[in-house]
Amino acid sequence: MKKIFQLSLLLCFSALTAQDSLNLSMDEAISYALEHNRTVLNAAHDIEIAKKQKWETTSTGLPQINITADYQNNLKQQVSLIPAEIFGGEPGTFEEVIFGTKHNVNALATLSQKIFDGSYIVGLQSAKVYLDISRNARKKTELEVRKSVINAYGNVLLTEENIRILRKNKEVLEKNVYETRKTYENGLAEEESVEQLQITLAGIESDLQNSIRLREIAYKMLNITIGAPIDTPVSLSDRLDNLAVENTVPGLAEAQFNPENNIDYRIADINTKSQELLLKNEKSKGLPTLEAFINGGYLGFGNSFDFFKREQEWFGNSMVGLSLNVPVFSALGRSAATQRMKIELEKAKNDLRETEQKLQLDIQQAKSNYQFSLEQFQTRKRNLELAERIEHKNQVKFSEGMATSFDLRQAQTQLYTAQQEYLQSMLDIINNKTELEAILHNANE
């Protein structure tokens, strides 16, 4: 029974551990990040805030109802003096009288409605623009997060491949050191040959330990990027070489580019529209505003607080009217504000033109980088094949005593460099394609 209980606990723990771990392809990692990345979540919240603000602005132009209730307790009522002769008193003298009651209650309900207000019309247009700004900001955020995920995912794969290659190189070197030491002990090799190989082995071991440490950091960076807890176990189902092949699209470097489809251009364009509305709003402040209202209420009076009693008498009142406000003179304040908004609009237009020109340069650079990474991949692939053949030949020559340990070490160092460059070229293809697609991305999608 005890063993069954222990087995059940083990199965439950295994199930919980499996539930907390993630197995992701690169596309799955991107999808996960778009749902869990904190920056993306905040961008989604900004859209909801913009929607609420849009309704908040709209509601100010709809009928408004307000109810007010005032209660006054005249702790010491004001005394007034009136001629005493009014009450039959002696002329020239005054009588002290108190007007009003000690307790007063006033309840009033007011219904108001804007009839014309230029600022309200501009406010409605601005609320829509603000919503567009939030939506474009979210698209920009999603593109940036996508690039970050691809970069973080690729760095993990690069580190894993690097560790695999370093371990393989270490095994070969350990075998070389062992065989050379035996040869030296038998008097058929020099001690320098052993030392040369030990130097190379020490460097490989150091690089391997460093790569193992970097792997842990790379996984944590990936977790942060996709929005998972930092210590979540993650396994990656894609391979670096497969992703490099999938991202090799030669025709992509010739793709047509329309700046107006780019998200950065859209953001700059929306900023220009926003400045146009701010200018329009300043101009509208010089227009009259008209508002209609109707109110009704009740007044209650008494020298004692009896307002909740049935016999309390209440006096009704009501009013209907219009409120017209005509701006006449602002000491040139509105004129200065309008001129300031015109300057801000010109700045926004300049930013838009600069953004368009910068995008033209960015797309050329991105296409060049991507094309270069494709060419570099093929070059470094051939270099790796050559380096492997050279290293293998030197291995054979060294074992047969036809090459020195220095020659072997030089060939091995050349191989290790070619291996690193080849791995980096695969990652460059993935990252450069992502950068190019981000610029080509249609903001309307």
Image (spheres, helix red, strand yellow):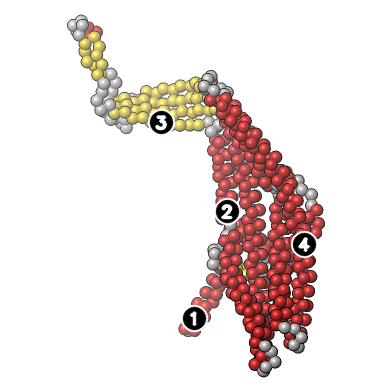
Residue at image mark 3: 68
Residue at figure coordinates x 57%, y 67% from the top left: 217
- Whichever of labels 3 and 4 marks the residue nearer the N terminus, that label is 3
Q: How far apart in space, not on screen, are marks 2 and 3 (Cα)?
A: 44 Å
* Horizontal relation, residue 432 to residue 205: left or right: right
Q: What SS does tag 1 mark?
A: helix
Q: How far apart in space, not on screen, are marks 3 and 4 (Cα)?
A: 74 Å
- Whichever of labels 4 and 2 marks the residue nearer the N terminus, that label is 2
Residue at image mark 2: 39
- Whichever of labels 3 and 1 marks the residue nearer the N terminus, that label is 1
The kind of residue on which mark 3 rests is Thr
Q: Nearer the viewer, mark 3 or mark 4?
A: 4
Q: Nearer the viewer, mark 2 or mark 3?
A: 2
Q: Nearer the viewer, residue 81 or 311?
A: 81
Q: Nearer the viewer, residue 51 or 150?
A: 150
Residue at image mark 1: 6
Indicate which disc residue 374 carries. Answer: 4
Q: Quadrant of residue 211?
A: bottom right
Q: What SS does tag 2 mark?
A: helix
The kind of residue on which mark 1 rests is Gln
3 and 4 marks in contact (CB < 8 Å): no
